Amino acid sequence: MEWQHDVNDLRDVSDVAAERRAAHSMRRKQTGKRKFKFEIGRVATPEKILDKMEENRSFADFYWSSFGRHCLCDWGNVSQEDKEANDQAIKSGGPLFSSYTHPVEHWTICILTEADRSETAIGLPEEFDLNEV
């Protein structure tokens, strides 16, 4: 799976990004008392997703809910075969892919944690090459 954005498309170098990362970190701590089932590494979110989160509280809640579900091994709207592959990848190593669709707004978010657990990318379906997952 290739993340199709240039690193510069992610806001890791701006002051605004530092504020967002701090809020992101705080929110991650607030996702519940349940422990994540695997290491998530660095979280990469494209700027357009971050902007949409700022503009729309409902979308931000959906983002965090999807992220929490992924970290707790609820793989969302992927096939049974993909769910089983993810469950096996937890044990043996391998990429973890999930997809979530909002039941009312029909937004979809995809999440990919790299096999080495160094990064978790969160984005829209068109930002992922789903043939490689």
Image: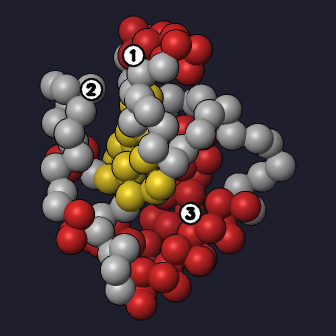
Q: Residue sitting at 59 percent across and 39 percent down?
A: 39
Which residue is labeled 1 in the image? 82
Q: Label for residue 61?
A: 3
Q: Are marks 1 and 2 in contact (CB under 8 Å)?
A: yes
User: Label 1, label 2: how many angstroms apart (C-alpha)?
Assistant: 9 Å
Q: Residue sitting at 35 percent across and 86 percent down?
A: 14
Dot 1 lies on which element? helix
Residue 19, above or below 46: below
Mark 1 or 2, nearer chain start: 1
Dot 3 lies on which element? helix
Q: Nearer the viewer, residue 40 or 116?
A: 116
Write down the quadrant of residue 64 in the picture.
bottom right
Q: Position of residue 68 (x, y in %)?
A: 61, 47
Write down the quadrant of residue 77 in the picture.
top left
Q: Position of residue 84 (x, y in %)?
A: 48, 10
Figure quadrant of the N terminus: top left
Write down the quadrant of residue 10 in the picture.
bottom left
Lateral position of residue 86 relative to residue 130, left or right? right
Mark 3 or 1, nearer chain start: 3
Residue 25, above or below 132: below
Which residue is labeled 2 in the image? 133
Mark 3 Cα shell of 10 Å, populated few (<14), some (14-19), many (≥20): few
